[in-house]
Each structure stands twice: as structure tokens, then as C-alpha cells.
Amino acid sequence: MLDYIRAELYKVTHRAYPYVFLLLMLAGETLLAGGWVFTNAHGNRITFASGAGMVVMILSMGLYCTILVGDMVFSDQFRHNTLKNEVSFGLPRGRIYLGKLIVACVTAICLCAVVLIYYLGLCRLVLPGEAGDLETLKAVALAVLAALPLWLGGQALMIALYFLLRSGTAAAIVGVVIFLAVPQVWYVLACTVSDVFWVLHGVMLSTPLDEINTVTAFGPFLAKTAATGAGWFLAATAAGLIGFRRREIS
Amino acid sequence: MAECILATRGLTKRYGPRAAVDHVSLTLEKGQIYGLVGRNGAGKTTIIRMVTAQTNPTSGEIALFGASTPAGLNKMRARVGAMVEIPSFYPYLTARENLEYYRLQRGIPGARVVGEALEAVRLAGTGKKKFKQFSLGMKQRLGLALALMNQPELLLLDEPINGLDPEGIVEFRNLLLDLCSRRQTTILISSHILSELSALATCYGFLDGGRLLEQISAEALHEKCRACLELQVGDPASAARVLENTLGLRDYEVLPGGVLRLYGSEEPDRVAKALVEGGVSLRGVESRGANLEDYFLNLIGGVRHA
């Protein structure tokens, strides 16, 4: 398994995709921070606390980034037909699947760390600080900690979709539908048809991320996001593994 | 008895009602170059895909180096090099990066094996050129380099000379012959370019409609294809006497049913005249002899158009 993970990391780090992705993210962050510096110079007062607090508002973006990271690692294997080189050498399909999943999670965490550290560091450098900045950082850290299992659950779902669907585009579209549209459907049905749909709405990956701003008791919330993320992670991985074991490589 | 490297027993693959491979039982012994002969759709690629776990057999059994359980087969596949259909690699990586990726993945020790494999197929000088910029011939060479990288004991090659230039074909042939003689590598090679196969194979399997029609050694095939004069006579013993005493011929064989096969380049008229004058009842004379292509076409019942 270690050999497989090493090879996948080699492949990911030898393509332009992660670097372009990172460059765009960092450029976006620089633009955002630059905009605040500009408005501050014209009488506005955006502090480090407000700038860093933005992280909590945009945690849902992390879910959509799993679509790109999944694509980065899975690398359109069906379109390039490269899986045949792996199975014909006798690599067990479970190793192939789990190896890619682990590398996707590692890549996602690394990219996330770079993006967050850069953003918070930039905010610290260019925005005025206040007495409660440490508290802000703690709140951001807790929110990221709560979001992490949901992101990993999303990553497992995306890897399963890339393995199960022949087209990478189709997998990305299904991912967006599950992250964005399905919770909205449950929400509408819960409001109009039955309260039962609140349960379904509650177990979706994006629901806790939307609630994160209003959380007062972080302990139970962390437990909830951990359970939701783990549930999606295990269910998606089981489905993906079963589907991939039966799949013909053609 | 030579070691059995690959054996299939009743191997069958069905897609709906159609059998792509139908109860195929073939055997490859150590050091053989096995030519799998058949038209497009005969089942050659499907057999190789089943051996390489790309598709599951509907029924039947595969044994690789004596192992036939799923776990055992997977383990033994590490001793196999395969090039199935068009070589597939990551388009955004170079030849060296692609091979390095598979070297790491397969746990092959020593980074120099990548350079050696590229040298062997004359791709060492491709530098930073990405796979997507390769010609078909270069892609074929890289596919072969990957198949050779783990120094396989069994090499499975599906239409490997497609896209190679004449020089590349000669090099490829020499490479295979060298592997076979120096490392005792067993090779299964499928092709419909029969002239190329005939320069390599030590054994043939003829496939048609998913069925293995015949498995035959190159010597036996050569024997069957030898140019000869086939005589249908009433009394083979008298005919043999005439051939030996009157014409001084010794290179012949007597087959059941009053058939005599006379090898060499004897004039049919001269032989017929001698037999008739010797009192032998001659019922028929026919010149025979075929190349691999003729033999295959005869076997499948002539040229058929889809």
C-alpha cells in the first residue's frame, strides 16, 4: 500500500493541476485581502477579526474543492484507460481504491492547510489587529475542525463517484447535485410535506456547514459533524469498493 | 516435461447471448513464443484481458505459474508483463515520469530500471516530451517498456507491432527473440499480421468465433505446410515400391486411406507416369503446401466477409 501511495503522490506532484489550483486560490485570497486594504485606506475598518472570520462563512467551499481534488488524484483513469496497467500487474482492486482515497485526503488536507495558513497570515499582515484576535483564531480553528470530517466525507464521496461513473464530468455534476441541490430538495419537502425530511436534510454534508455560524455549543456540534462525516466516508467507500471490484476495465 | 506457465481450461466469456470466448483450453510452456492467430473479434484480446484481470471470465479456469485461486492469480500477475490493446499512459507525464510512476507503484527496486527499459525500446532520448505528443509507434514502444520493466517471466502482447515502422518491427522481433533465448521468457503474442508471427512463434493457437480451433507447434505446422505431392492410390505398398525403385525417391509418407505424401519438388507428370507404368492404380494427384495464412484460412473454412 505504501508503494501505491508513494506512486500516487509522485503523479499528483508531477502535474500542473495542484499548482494551478493553489495559485488561483492564493491569488483569490490576495485579491480579497488587497480589496480590504484598499477600502481601509478609504475610511473603512476591516480588522483581522472580520477578515479571519470570513473563513467560517466560506467553509462550504471546501466541499466543492473535493470535486477538484478528487479529479486531481483520480486523473481521468477511465478516459486515459490507465487502470488496466494497474490491475494487469495484479494490484488488488481494494489497494487501488483505498490508495487513491488516502492520497486524495492527504492532498486535500495539504492544500487546505496552505490555503488557510496563507489567508490567515495575510490577514494578520495587512489588517489591523485587536485585543480579541486570539479568540477569533480559536473560533476559526474550531470551525475548521468541525468542517474537516465533513470535507473528508465529501472527498470519499467524490472518489467513489469518480470510480463508479465512467465520465469525470458526470461524477462532478452528481457531486454538485448531492452537495447543493439535494439538501435544498429535502428542505423544501420538510417545509411543505413532512417533518421526516428534516432528518434527511440533517444528515447531508452541507447542512452542518450552513449552521456553523449559529452554533453556540461546539462540543455536541463537533460530535455531530464527526458522525455525519464518518457516516458519509464509510458509506461512500463501501459503495465505491463494491462497485469497483465488479467493474470491467475496458 | 517443460514447466506450464499459463493454462486455461474451458475459459468462456459471454456478453449477453454472444460468446466472445468459448471454452478455450490452451497451454503455454516455459520458453515458448505462442502465436495467437485469429481475425478481429475472434477472442484474442478477450483471452488476454481475462488473464490480466481486466475482465472476469463467465466460466472456466485460468492457472498462472500453477496458481488458480483469485489471490494466487493476483500474486502471480506480478511475474507477468502485458501490453493489451493501445498502450495507455498519463498524457501530461513524460515517458520517464510515466515509467517512474509505475515503478514506484509496483515496488520495483532501483530507479535505473526505468532508464534501462527506455534504452531497450529506444525512447531514452525523448526528454521532456509528454506522452500526449508521442506518435503511435512511440506509444507502442513505451507500452513495451512498461511490459518489460519488471523483467517478466511471461509476456502478454496484444497486437504489439501496430504502428511500428519497418525498422521498429525488426528491432521488436529481435528483442523478443533475445528475451526468449537469454531469459527464457515465455511470450504470448496475438496478431493478425501472420507473416510477422511466423518469424517468431514456436507454437500457434488458431481462434475463430471465440473457439480455439487448433493448438499446434511450429514444427508440426511446418510439417503440415510442407510442399508435397499427395497421391491417392489403390495399393500404397506397390506405389511405394515404384517410388523407391523406379524414381529413387525416399522422402514420402504413407497415410491412411491409400494416401501417399511425396515431399520435394517432383514433377507430377513424371511421378504419375511411373506409377501407371508400374501397374499402380492412381486415383488422384494433387500438389499441396501452404503458408501460415493459407493454413489459417483453410482451418476457418476459407475467407469470409463480415
Image (cartoon, coloured by chain):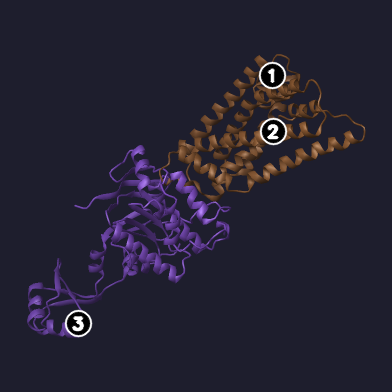
**Which label belongs to residue A198?**
1
Give the distance between the C-alpha atoms of the residues marked 3 and 1, in whole angstroms.
Answer: 95 Å
Q: Chain of mark 3?
A: B
Q: Nearer the viewer, mark 1 or mark 2?
A: 2
Q: Position of residue B198 (x, y in %)?
A: 33, 67
Q: Chain of mark 1?
A: A
Q: Are marks 1 and 2 on the same chain?
A: yes
Q: Secondary structure at mark 1?
A: helix
Q: Which residue is mark 3?
A: B266
Please tell me which residue lies in front, B232 or B206: B206
Left or right placement of residue B123 versus residue A134 in this view = left
Asked if B206 appears above or below A97 in the picture, the reply is below
Q: Are there few (<14), some (14-19), or many (20+) residues within 10 Å of tag 2?
A: few
What is the spatial separation of the Cα atoms under label 2 and label 3, in whole angstroms? 91 Å
- Colour in which chain B is shown? purple
SS of the residue at dot 3?
Answer: loop
Residue A241 location (% of width, % of height):
50, 34
